[in-house]
Image: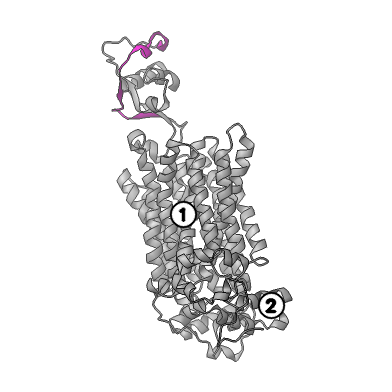
Amino acid sequence: MTTFDDILEEVGTFGRCQKRIFALFCLVSMPWAGVYVGIVFQGFTPDHWCRDPAVVERRQTCGWSLTEARRLTVSQGNRSESSCERYEVDWNSTALSCDSGELALSRIPTTAACKDGWEYDYEGRQSFVTEFDLVCADGWLVDLYQASLNVGFLVGSIAIGYLADRFGRKISFLMSNVLNAVTGIMVAMAPNYVALLVFRTLCGFGVKGGWVAGYVLLTELVGVEYRRTVGVLYQMFFSVGILILPLLAYLISDWRWLQVAITAPYFIFLSYYWFIPESPRWLLSQKQNAKAVKITQAMAKENKKTLSKNIETLTDDNAQSRTASFMDLIRTPNMRKNTLILSFNWFTSAVVYQGLIMRLGILGGNVYIDFLISGLVEFPAAFLILFTIERIGRRIPFASANIMAGAACLITAFIPDSMFWFKTVAACIGRLGITMAFQMVVFVNTELYPTFVRNFGVSVCSTLCDVGGIVAPFLLYRLAVIWLELPLIIFGCLAFVAGGLVLLLPETRGMPLPDTIDDIEHPERRMEKAILRNPAADQPASHCKHMQQQRNSYGLTATDRSIFFLYSFLDFTAVSKFPLNILTHRRFKPQGRVTLD
């Protein structure tokens, strides 16, 4: 019996075919940045004040500046009052000449809430905030706009994740892009706020599910040694999108046309129907062996490789049910532990990452420059991941990134504003750390679930990312009212806890993708597959030592021992079965298992 990993060695683990598909999918990450954080430009809130029809009419007649007209409309004291209240003036009994300096309206003691709308100082740029007057008492509706996108992410990632495991990665990806293209244009044409909210939610439904389906398809087409590079670079193109977005926003002043520009690539992605294959791994898991063989042969031909006759016995060694369910994620101890920890890390990454981006908006400054810097900071994150995860492993860099982000957030919160550059550097370090953590949780998630439930598992765990995205805008803006730095304290604590939990996950460096739940519950069996595929004679000594240490599944390191009680909280049943000599760090060889010693 020949598995797909065996045939992939003959096809080419990252040949011309995989490189072409990888390049096509990288383009998918760029417009997602516009969908995810485009609110900063599409929903910006400019300086505003109450509209007084009489003053507006006189300004047009007399040619007053906005500053002169504003002086006759609102108090120049407290900013919130000047934005949401105006002088109560009976202009029929007040002489209103073109000499605005003759009027002393500050002596008028009475003010009233805005009843005729608002004036905006946006210098020709328009957002849905200015169009639908989402300010003052309705300001929270801007937060709801961003939250609605994450509601769409939440529902769509589960639904499309299930469809991807049930009907295939390719068809789910294409269906998502049809939805993205249609709803994106509907957002641009929304006649009112309610319609805008509905279309925005539908747009979120397709965007994330399609992105995850593409990610899983890529992961399943390349060899184990290229998974980390493909995964990190796939996400890094999101940062490329962040760099492009401020340029588009600078050139396109109207939020509706900016939405069209963000949506346009999704029409192009529909052409991928002719350029990308279905995942052979998924086809094998669905007993569609003939199609899997045909696609594998086409990949080998494009890679200029010749397949052996082993292709005729290509099969899937997955003995589990071919239809994924939520119970598959929590039924067994290791699957349950992985699901809980990964879900919390998805939540933390979303809250901290999105919160730090939106925080730039409430700090002031040039939003175009701020976005450029935030995009540039993410590139070192990608290269740090690529440099460390094959040398050190996944677990330590993943945990360190979270802890670094948490420490930077806490330090930034207590740095005085007078130390501007020091505070900026600390904030950038926090952004670097959480970007690393966000990128790592995606591909670590795919490495900890078997084939038949992989797409569904990633989608379910990432729903906590969407919950974090829903919480983040309200958490940031409401806590900032109490104390501007209070959100950073919350972000820092969340990141510290997430980093500690990561240390409980198994190491996946150099491991083949798991095919069954049994591979997750008994990692030594999956390790044996890796050793058979890559004999010890061909491996560096350090790698063989690493494999031997991982093979002894009950031999804990000092780090494992220090977090033993936290592990017992997550999975008391499994820990209660551990032999007592674990706590003294003596090597233990489970009876009935073949060891490498």
Q: Position of residue 188 (x, y in %)?
A: 39, 47
Q: Nearer the viewer, residue 513 or 518?
A: 518
**Horizontal relation, residue 390 to residue 144: left or right:** right
Mark 2 — residue?
544
Residue type at mark 2?
Cys
For image coordinates 51% across by 44% down, the residue present is: 488
SS for callout 1: helix
For residue 93, side relative to residue 555 (left or right): left
The front one of 162 and 251 is: 162
In terms of depth relative to the viewer, which is nearer, 420 or 259? 420
Give whichever of discs 2 and 1 has the lower sequence position.
1
Q: Quadrant of the C terminus?
A: bottom right
On the rendered structure, is 375 left or right of 56? right
Spot occupied by residue 273 in the image (x, y as percentages of width and height): 47, 69
Query: Dot 2: what SS?
Result: helix
The answer to if 106 sits in the magenta stretch is yes
| Viewer can see residue 282 | yes
Residue shown at the point (34%, 38%) measured from the top left? 132
Give the crowd class for mark 2: few <14, some 14-19, many >=20 residues within 10 Å. some
Q: Which residues are magenta?
A: 99-120
Is the residue 36 above or below the residue 568 in the image?
A: above
| 212 drawn magenta | no
Q: CA distance from mark 2 to mark 1?
A: 49 Å
Question: What residue is rendered at 35% in x and 33% in y?
Answer: 136
Q: Residue 302 vs residue 167: left or right?
A: right
Disc number placed over residue 264 in the picture, else none: 1
Q: Residues within 10 Å of mark 1 (few under 14, many from 20)?
A: some
Residue 205 tag number: none
Image coordinates of residue 10 in percent, x first then y, are 63, 82
